[in-house]
Image (spheres, rainbow, N blue to C red):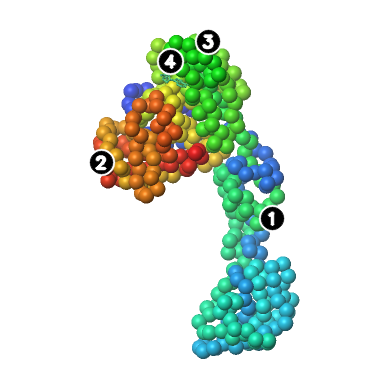
Amino acid sequence: MALKNDCFALPAGVKWTPVSEALADLRGRLTPVTGVETVPLVNAQGRILAADITSPVSLPPADNSAVDGYALAHASLHPEGEQTMTLLDGRAAAGSPFAARVPMGHAVRILTGGVMPQDTDTVVMDEDVDIDDHAIRFGSGLKAGANRRLAGEDVAAGDTLLTAGVRLGPAQLAHAAAVGLTVMPIHKPLRVAVLSTGDELAQPGEALEAGQIYDANRPMLLALARAQGVEVLDAGQIPDRPDAIVAALRDAAIAADAVVVSGGASGGDEDHVSRELAKMGAMALWRVAMKPGRPLALGQIGGVPIFGLPGNPVAAFVCFLIFARPALLRLAGAEWPETVSYPLTARFHAKKKPGRTEYLRGRADGQGGVDKYRSDGSGLIGGLTWSNGLVALDHERDAVEPGETVTFMPYSAMGIL
Ligand code: AMP
Ligand code: MG
């Protein structure tokens, strides 16, 4: 299902949109675009569920014991004092139930996972019991239903087990396997093409000529995208020539479901990406009030969204995580991800302009504090390797003093190292 032609159109004007507004806006315009396939459960790890799953059975299917001990009827206990119960022959173990009833005043051996025998509702655990040949003794105070797991307490037959849009991790696969499912309906992988623009770019392995730099963004963006579970396509490097850019973007939009391109987005002399996208129609420069990140160029070609990111590696990295990541996940069929963040104590000073959100490269120290990289320059890749997350300084904030609370967004919560 392609996006509408005008899906990224913004009202005219020069207003700088707050990050939260821009994200809400983007969220409202995107829907899943990938098809659905059914795969064996064991192959579904990391994939995005395409339909709600209801449970065909209750889990657990029957009342059972949470411990090793003795099953009995709570109603047969004395209100106080030491309890003595006659022990029946036989036992209930996981996979082999006790076939007979358990009369009042009697108990039967039960192991963890064993189905509660008929007429029992409570288990006294091994550690609390003295045993001789044919009787068990234990103290008072055992609660009715103790150490018993109830049928259906994890999920009842017919309940929704997993909802469309969740990423299938180990826990979700365990839940699906536990109710006997063998296959899962999942979204086909989103194909994301990544390309770089810039006449100055050389490829690793080539000798640098005067004025050249190596292309750092393409490996970075390929890795960022791959880490979100999408299928990536390396669409190469394009020179700063309108015809070359148009041809490369067109090809990428045919080969992929979404395109991520870095450089040339901001409207300068050699910034052909935004200009050519604008000529093709339905391109919007999103003037987002954030740093780093100049205008984000969002366009589409034949319903395929194009994310035009800044050329500076740090800005491309941040813009990818803040905008492209949730957008790609949504296109891939996932729920829009709410970024996990938490408050930490700043161990640094920072000045900031109110009226925009700033993302600093931060390093959480594991003791409740966070430091920032020595320089804010958005070309310095060293700040990315040094950091383990972003410090987000919100829109209205004007400065940070050591000891103040700041918001930290760990990279690990955004799927990357
Ligand atoms: P641009 O957005 O194209 O004006 O680029 C902004 C800055 O980022 C310039 O200094 C570019 O040389 C640099 N840059 C652009 N693309 C890349 C890339 N793929 N790898 C490393 N630096 C880049
Ligand atoms: Mg450029």
Q: Is residue 206 above or below residue 340?
A: above
- Give the mark nearer the N terminus: 1 vs 2: 1
Alpha carbon distance from label 3 to label 2: 49 Å
**Residue located beneath label 1 in the image:** 180
> Residue 127 placed where, x, y %?
57, 77
**Residue located beneath label 4 in the image:** 271
> Residue 328 placed where, x, y %?
52, 33
* Label 4 beta carbon less than 8 Å to ligand 1: yes
* Label 2 beta carbon less than 8 Å to ligand 1: no
- Picture quarter containing residue 409? top left
Alpha carbon distance from label 1 to label 3: 55 Å
Q: Is residue 108 visible?
A: yes
Ligand 2's quadrant is top left
Question: Is 365 left, or right, of 183 in this rendering?
Answer: left
Q: Is residue 354 visible?
A: no
- Picture quarter containing residue 384? top left
Three-letter code for the amino acid on which mark 1 is drawn: Gly
Please say if the residues under marks 1 and 3 sit with CB atoms less than 8 Å apart.
Answer: no
**Residue located beneath label 2 in the image:** 401
